Image (cartoon, rainbow, N blue to C red):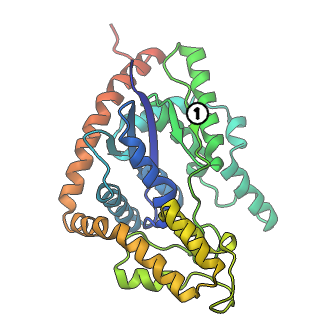
Amino acid sequence: MSKQRVLTGITTTGTPHLGNYVGAIRPAIQASQRADVQSFYFLADFHALIKCQEPELVHQSTREIAATWLALGLDVNNAIFYRQSDVPEIPELCWMLTCMAAKGLMNRAHAYKASVDANVAAGEDPDFAITMGLYSYPILMAADILMFNAHKVPVGRDQIQHIEMARDIAGRFNHHYGEHFVLPEALVDDSVAVLQGLDGRKMSKSYGNTIPLFLPEKQLKKSINKILTNLLEPGQAKDPDTSPVFQIWQAFATPEQTAEMRQQFADGIAWGEAKRQLFELINSQLAEAREKYEALLANPAHIEEVLQQGAEKARAYSKPMLEKVREAVGIRKIK
């Protein structure tokens, strides 16, 4: 029985933070170790260009994110780990899928509609500053998925629409040219934590409330000390279910440690003490990976070598797939 293919893309914008680790990286690395799954992980640097037009930031983020996954234990012998831009078959397939994608379908994409609504609310032209990259984003995402005929794509609920669009585009292609693409399914794990940031909102680069994953110890402690708390004094019972400190603790702790901290909140633990314990918990789990991360950043040639090896593995799938698709649409040698 062939393995189920699971594909995950990581957009190369910004520095990875604790929320990325808990919500995406940690569960993905655990899933990649399953014997019945073939895992594809890619650095989505073409996607990054939609949001970021600063070349050095895109490049730096690519390096940092690659180093992060490797430092945290991604087994590149078991999983296929590559950079999107190293697989030229993907943008070529993207064009073929673009010729199958209905404009009406793209008009309904959440990101595009949100940008239009924001422009209208601001009194601007509806399409002000909206690029074709933003508009066509779901088609490139479909190409990423369909190139490898992924069965499952782990996503948050806000990305389910994009998987449905990929299914729609694949279905239209199959209808016109024969069965070439698997219809992918969204894999949503509601048990994965969505971390709160320093201000109590969802931890997000757009809010500027993140705790970078591999901060040095002193800076990590300073960041944790900035987490929003209320004015309750030591000795006063505190509600763990409304506290970002407890919520982050729960994402890193064992069930036993979580129960112990819940009791300490009921007993009125001081905020300073709770944050001290949180720092020690996170630091103990990330110290070894942080050391590996720093070593990898100091050896960019090794990161590049790993990505090139991953691209070679990925292209062992993408080249024959594109040949089939080209043949199907009539782009072939004249005989």
Residue at position x 33%, y 44% in the image? 81
Residue drawn at 73 percent across, 51 percent down: 113
For residue 311, side relative to residue 299 (left or right): right
Which percent across, then down, holds residue 277?
Answer: 47, 79
Q: Quadrant of the C terminus?
A: top left
Q: Nearer the viewer, residue 169 or 235?
A: 235
The answer to whether residue 57 of the structure is visible from this angle is yes
Left or right: 293 as drawn, with respect to 100: left
Q: Which residue is mark 1?
A: 166
Residue 93 in percent (x, y) is at 45, 31
Residue 49 on image: x %, y %? 47, 56
Tag 1: residue type? Ala
SS under mark 1: helix
Q: Can you say which quadrant of the picture contains the N terminus?
A: top left
Q: Is residue 261 above or below residue 91?
A: below
Residue nearer the viewer, 324 or 299: 299
Q: Residue at x 69, y 89 (%)?
A: 232
Circle 1 crowding by C-alpha within 10 Å: few under 14, some 14–19, many from 20: many
